[in-house]
Image (cartoon, grey):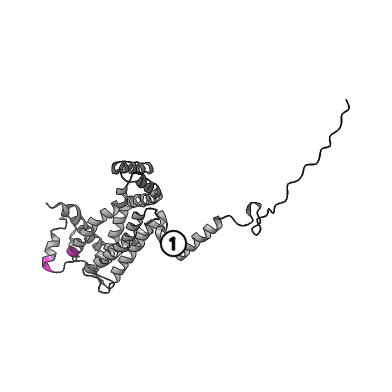
């Protein structure tokens, strides 16, 4: 028994085939619903990741101070760093866990698409080995599902490269939103590399793989951007958006003390408030002894 097939591939194949049968043999809609289910299962981890990333950006100056103080003592630096993480209730592992869990889904989905959309007899025989025996007969008669979805053949790469571009763009937006300002030059360099290399790598990858996989990634990114906006806002993408930058600049100006406040004249620095009232003079009476 193959653990990969039992735990990952077979459940994904049967879920996709079952969703396709329910959704009028439309495999594109099946991938869409499947993506929603995956994001729903990963939602608690995603929320935890977003909150942890935001806290990590807040404690970045403290991290830099620890590096300057214990730079030569690696053991002490690690001990103090873990204490800082524990104090703020964050873990570096939690920041990457949703991405790590997405990797088996991508690999399994790639294989499941190739199996489910098989059109030749050998492919259909291979698919039958991964289907559960208790599936209804009507579902088995709907195999293989319809592979056409808009201009796409979901079992082949996108001929117009529209999905690879959308994959790269949506990955860049999500990476930029998850990047917060930091005083650590090493972390800042890593953030720039992530926001530039990851979108290019995924965009190029989806040029070579079936468009059904690219469709999954685009939908997943769109959902991720929406969730991230409601949790952390625009993040590092905010300064690049004109309306967000304008709003931030207006708020900064309003927060500054205006000329003339606190009784000061903005032009000459004189006090413009009325002088305090003088107390009436009290005449002393000479008492005769």
Q: Which residue is pictured at 19% across the width and 66% down the height?
A: 117
Q: Secondary structure at mark 1?
A: helix
Q: Position of residue 112 (x, y in %)?
A: 19, 61
Where residue 233 appears, as percent x and y from the top left, is 42, 57
Magenta stretch holds residue 114: yes
Quadrant of image for the C terminus? top right
Residue lying furthest top? 289
Residue 127 sits in which quadrant? bottom left
Residue 286 visible, this angle: yes
Q: Between residue 189 and residue 252, name the one nearer to us.
A: 189
66 over 289 or under it: above or below: below
Residue at left 19%, top 63%?
A: 116
Q: Position of residue 59 (x, y in %)?
A: 39, 48
Asked if residue 193 lies left or right of residue 232, the reply is left
Instruction: Identify the magenta region.
Output: 113-122
- Residue lying furthest front: 72
Q: Badge 1: few (under 14), some or many (20 or more) residues near its Cα, within 10 Å?
A: some
Q: Nearer the viewer, residue 174 or 183?
A: 183
Residue 251 coordinates in the image, percent (x, y): 52, 58
Q: Nearer the viewer, residue 41 or 204?
A: 204
Which residue in the structure is indicated by mark 1?
A: 239
Q: Quadrant of residue 235?
A: bottom left
SS assignment for the magenta stretch, majority: helix
Residue 146 visible in the current orientation: no
8 relative position to 192: left or right: left
Up/down of 63 relative to 168, above or below: above
């Amino acid at each position: 028994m193959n653990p990969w097939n039992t735990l990952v591939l077979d459940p994904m194949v049967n879920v996709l085939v079952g969703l396709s049968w329910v959704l009028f043999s439309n495999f594109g809609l099946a991938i869409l619903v499947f993506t929603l289910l995956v994001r729903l299962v990963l939602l608690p981890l995603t929320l935890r990741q977003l909150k942890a990333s935001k806290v990590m950006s807040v404690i970045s100056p403290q991290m830099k101070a620890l590096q300057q103080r214990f730079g030569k003592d690696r053991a002490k630096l690690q001990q103090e760093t873990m204490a800082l993480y524990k104090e703020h209730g964050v873990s570096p592992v939690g920041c990457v866990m949703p991405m790590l869990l997405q990797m088996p889904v991508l690999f399994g989905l790639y294989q499941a698409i190739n199996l489910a959309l098989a059109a030749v007899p050998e492919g259909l025989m291979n698919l039958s080995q991964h289907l559960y025996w208790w599936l209804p007969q009507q579902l088995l008669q709907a195999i293989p599902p319809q592979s056409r979805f808009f201009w796409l053949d979901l079992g082949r790469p996108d001929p117009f490269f529209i999905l690879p571009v959308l994959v790269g763009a949506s990955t860049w937006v999500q990476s930029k939103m998850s990047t917060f300002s930091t005083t650590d030059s090493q972390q800042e360099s890593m953030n720039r590399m992530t926001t530039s290399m990851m979108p290019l790598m995924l965009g190029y990858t989806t040029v070579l793989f079936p468009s059904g996989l690219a469709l999954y990634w685009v939908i997943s990114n769109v959902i991720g951007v929406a969730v991230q906006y409601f949790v952390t806002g625009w993040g590092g993408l905010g300064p690049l958006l004109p309306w967000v930058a304008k709003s931030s600049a207006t708020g900064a100006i309003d927060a500054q003390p205006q000329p003339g406040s606190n009784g000061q004249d903005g032009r000459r620095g004189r006090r413009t408030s009325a002088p305090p009232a003088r107390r009436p003079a009290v005449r002393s009476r000479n008492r005769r002894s």
